[in-house]
Amino acid sequence: MIDMCICHVHFGVSFSMVGPQKEMGQLSIKTHSSSATEDVLWTRTKPGAEEWNRVIKIIPLGLHRIVIEAEVKGSKGRGDIAIDDVEIYTCDQLSKL
């Protein structure tokens, strides 16, 4: 969890979801604000090929806690969710990439 107080930022994460559909749960990016509201910015429920994907979302103004939540369902343990390369950019930093 990361607390921040900047204008808006871009939040990026690489992810991989591999396994049978019945065993796969979901991967979500959420924000929790100081007023105790939760916003779901992005959710994926389908497994993909054995490759890495990337998602970048804009986090709105204010003080927020960013939450990455993964859920694997089923009891056989054949669904895998992995994350890597978590990055946060301000608008100014993103324009320099």
Image (cartoon, helix red, strand yellow):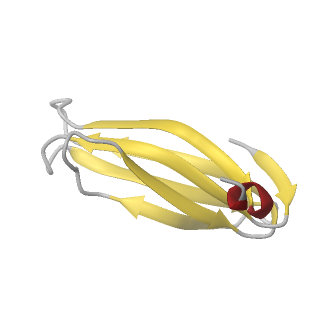
x then y, percent, for residue 41:
54, 66
Give the answer, above or below, for where 12 lies relative to 39.
Answer: above
Q: Residue at x 43, y 51 (%)?
A: 54
Q: Residue at x 53, y 55 (%)?
A: 29
Give the side of residue 9 with respect to residue 6, left or right: left
- Residue 30: give x, y in percent of width and height: 58, 58
The foreground one among 27 and 73 is 27
In the image, is 42 to the left or to the right of 34? left
Corner quadrant of residue 23: top left
Q: Which image quadrant for residue 75?
A: top left
Across and down, in percent, residue 87 comes to 63, 44
In this view, the residue farthest toward the front is 96
Q: Residue at x 24, y 56 (%)?
A: 46
Q: Quadrant of the N terminus?
A: top right
Number of marks in picture: 0
Whole-percent x, y for residue 15 in the image: 40, 44
Q: Could you say which quadrant of the image residue 81 lies in?
A: top left
Q: Nearer the viewer, residue 32 or 91?
A: 91
Left or right side of 87 for 72: left
Question: Which residue is most to the top?
Answer: 77
